[in-house]
Image: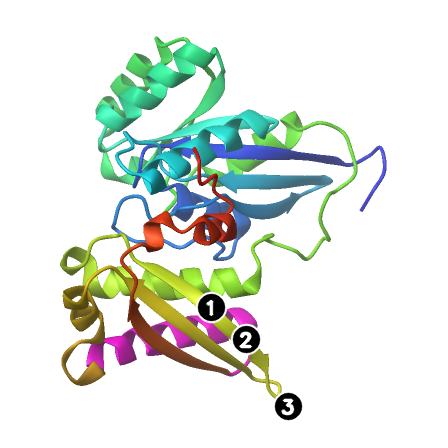
Amino acid sequence: MTGSSTRCGFVAILGAPNVGKSTLLNRLVGAKVSIVSPKVQTTRTRVLGIRIEGATQIVFVDTPGIFQPRRRLDRAMVAAAWSGAADADTAMLLVDAARGIDGDTAGVLGRLRETGRRVDLVLNKIDLIDKPKLLDLAGRLDTEGLFNDVFMVSAATGDGVDDLVGFLAGRLPDGPWLFPEDQISDMPMRLLAAEVTREKVYLRLQQELPYQTAVETESWTERDDGSAEVRQVVYVRRDSQKAIVLGKGGQRIKAIGAAARTELEEMLDRRVHLFLFVKVRDGWGDDPERYAEWGLDFNA
């Protein structure tokens, strides 16, 4: 759909790690485009999710969680988050209502004060907090003078999300749509497949393995029968971590592969032959090519 009757724009989703940005993005789009796990700093790169609301195409930008960076990868992720906000037509700060104003969220508020950028406030996980506490938190944040409008949602249940979408659709500028009507993300399938497997690694291992794990889709082959053959490498930093990922007799990596394959088949609506390999690469966190693949600035 094109023409003067249409609207289109970018909406950045900012917030501290683990406040529910990826869950909200998937809810907004109505399909899974960003991986979700209990681990903090799961999202590493900018992920676009696209939703059509009436005559408006809303392009949501899920950014990495903003926190105090310690390593090169941390700095690149935080830089990508602020860059996503700066480039968007409008932005919203997502706050975990049940957690309140923790150190990372306080840091985001400080940066917003420094830049003078006004955003919308979205209080998430309202299903996990009593209403008086929720209203008190909203009042305290409103006194910051940083927010245009305040919304209360539950990304997990969908409560309040439609109201948020309707509001955003009316705010975006007039203009033609930037993506085809049936497209829900700009992420290449090879990268999305790697992200699905990385999510399964996190969910299976949780506290047993640091989050500094990478997954790369080495090859994607279309078979004559319509199925896809996908070969991926899970990179870890030490031999001890490799043993954890493999599990006794390779049972853990088989379970990870089975879970990833099931989800990929649902996403693609066809058979997927997934082959996983685990390799040790201590320096993957300092590999410029890896940063380029994620859309991150190696020198941030």
Dots 3 and 1: beta carbons under 8 Å?
no
Mark 1 neighbour class, 10 Å CA radius: few under 14, some 14 to 19, many 20 or more: many
Q: Could you tell me if residue 92 is visible in this image?
A: yes
Q: Picture coordinates of residue 209 (x, y %)? A: 18, 58
Q: Amino acid at mark 2?
A: Trp
Give the residue at x 80% y 47%.
Answer: 1
Q: Pinpoint residue 272: horizontal percent, then vertical percent.
A: 49, 81
Q: Can you tell which mark lies on residue 220?
A: 2
Q: Is residue 262 magenta?
A: yes
Is residue 221 found left or right of 108 in the rendered image? right
**Magenta region:** 251-271
In the depicted view, which residue is nearer to us: 214 or 95?
214
Tag 3: amino acid: Asp
Residue pushed farthest bottom?
A: 225
Q: Residue 87: which quarter of the image?
A: top right
- Residue occupying image coordinates x 79% and y 38%: 176
Amino acid under disc 1 = Thr
What crowding class fits label 3: few (fewer than 14 Cα within 10 Å), some (14-19), or many (20 or more)? Answer: few
As displayed, is residue 177 above or below residue 95? Answer: below
**What secondary structure prevails in the magenta region?**
helix
Instruction: Name the mark on residue 224.
Output: 3
Asked whether the beta carbons under mark 1 and mark 2 sit within 8 Å of each other, the answer is yes
Mark on residue 217?
1
Q: CA distance from mark 1 to mark 2?
A: 7 Å
Q: Give coordinates of residue 159: x percent, y percent.
A: 41, 41
- When the figure is inspected, residue 91 is found, relative to residue 41, above or below; the finding is above
Q: Is residue 230 above or below residue 40?
A: below
236 or 251, nearer to the observer:
236
Disc 1 is placed on an element classified as strand
